[in-house]
Image: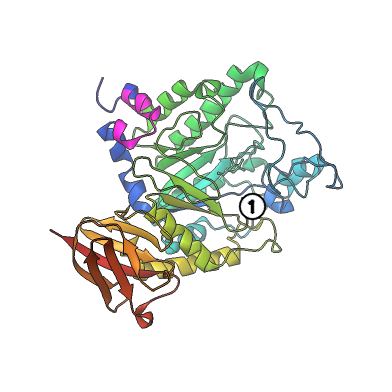
Amino acid sequence: MTPDGFDQFWADAQKPGRADKSEASRRRLDWWRDAKLGIFVHWNPSSVAAGEISWSKQFYGDTGEDHRDNPRPSAGPDIPEHRVWFDWFRPAVPREVYDNLPRSFFPGMFDADAFVATAKRAGAGYLVMVTKHHDGFCMWDTRFTDFNVMNTPFRRDIVAEMAAACERAGIRFGIYYSQRDWHHPDYGPERMAAYNEYMHNQVEELLLRHRNISVVFFDTEHYYPSKLWDGERLFRMIHRLRPEIVINDRCGVPADFGTPEQSIGAWDPGRDWESCMTFTGFWSWRGFQAPVIPFEECLLRLVRCAGGNGNLLMNVGPLPTGQVDPREADRLERLGAWLARNGESIFGTRGGPYPPGDYGVSTQRGDTVYLHVLRWPEGDVVLLPPGRRVASARVLSGGRAAVSATAAGLRVSVAPADRTEPDTIVVLELGG
Ligand code: GLC
């Protein structure tokens, strides 16, 4: 058994703590931790109806008023399927309509290079796209089911186009793949072995076709045990094809990183995590009436993730035309412009050394600390816990920062004229 052989890989996958994992497992995440920002893409024919991906499929009665029991199968006898979840189910799309959406799926303006260029300009180091969501529709030319993009009028393998575009653009490519499947006839407690065969085959097919897949984002809740998916065999296959892969924690084992959803992960130097968050509260495109968060909010998320020692996977929900929603593209454009000026305080950093607080967060690279002041406390002084000596201090955008060490800790202040909204970045060089 070599240190990064499968036994070690699988043993590491059971352990949440970084420190308990092998050197090889920690190393695999280096690029991912440095990247800090990824773009998530939730897109399939559901965009045609502007209904939430998978969840909108007739969960309510046709009027949308009366609530019905979830008619979908769950994976095991003791495993509850979700009944109610936020507004995702509303408005309901009648089953007959939802099932026919692939017939109207023709994203004629889709250009993978343009799409990926938007992600890259935003500063993202990777892109993770939905290949198959809970509704079972496959966005690639799979040989294991006809329920796929080649049987829409569009007839182009969107996963292949995205994978190739990411390769050309020099950003990493990842796949979201839902084990849960409300379309496949074998999905459900009776024929799980047959279903798992199908599911493993599909993941293998994707990995064999696209050598640049660097991340697998599975998706079911933690109470689905890995055994249900024949997880060890699944991970063995993945490891055989791609020993360098990074895998999330949604296949019944903690694996490489945690996945807080719609919230910023808690500061935790001992465990890697990635917050996945949406612009609208929905995963897929919900029409122009769904408000998009302002740029500032988007920036604060990224900064808080970096300061919490985590990543941000910012989700876009493309239009049925295949384009990024122009409002989301605008936020990403501005994020990229901000990162072009301030990226050294985010990319390649780790969270800390000061824990996040009311004032904001800190990030660090070697002896350089970036203090991100997002809110000036009353009295205009940020008080940090005592730590190493500060050799010099300045404001990243230009200007002076006053720093003094007291028994209570470090006092940091910046004259109002030298502050920048919504984030004033103070660069501290630590010494001694
Ligand atoms: C949830 C939802 C799913 C979404 C995912 C993104 O698990 O079921 O719709 O794709 O979160 O993280």
Which residue is more in the foreground, 429 or 79? 429
Callout 1, which amino acid?
A: Phe
> Is residue 285 visible in this depiction of the protein?
yes
Tell me: 431 left or right of 201: left
Q: Quick check: is 11 in the magenta stretch?
A: yes
Q: Is residue 21 left or right of 169 when viewed as pictured? A: left
In terms of depth relative to the viewer, which is nearer, 158 or 96? 96
Q: Where 106 sits versus 59, above or below? A: below
Crowding near pointer 1: few (<14 within 10 Å), some, many (20+)?
A: many
| Residue at point 63%, 31% (across, down) | 145
Q: Position of residue 180 (x, y in %)?
A: 61, 32
Residue 111 image offset from top left, x and y in percent = 54, 58
Outermost residue, bottom direction? 417
Q: Is residue 199 magenta?
A: no
Q: Main secondary structure of the magenta part?
A: helix
* Quarter of the C terminus within the rendering: bottom left
Q: Is residue 181 above or below residue 344?
A: above
Image location (x, y in percent) of residue 79: 64, 25
Q: Which residues are magenta?
A: 8-20
Quarter of the image for residue 273 reads top left
Tally of numbered discs: 1
> Between residues 411 and 346, which one lies in front from this camera angle?
411
Question: In this figure, which residue is indicated by the disc labeled 1?
Answer: 282
Image: 327 above or below 31: below
Q: Where does the image place residue 128, in percent across and percent down from the top left?
A: 49, 47
Please identify the quarter of the rendering in which residue 330 is found: bottom right
Asked where in the image residue 189 lies, by quadrant, the reply is: top right
Question: Which secondary structure, mark 1?
Answer: loop
Q: Nearer the viewer, residue 216 or 301?
A: 301
Q: How is the image coloured?
A: rainbow
- The quarter of the image that holds ligand 1 is top right
Q: Is residue 170 visible?
A: no
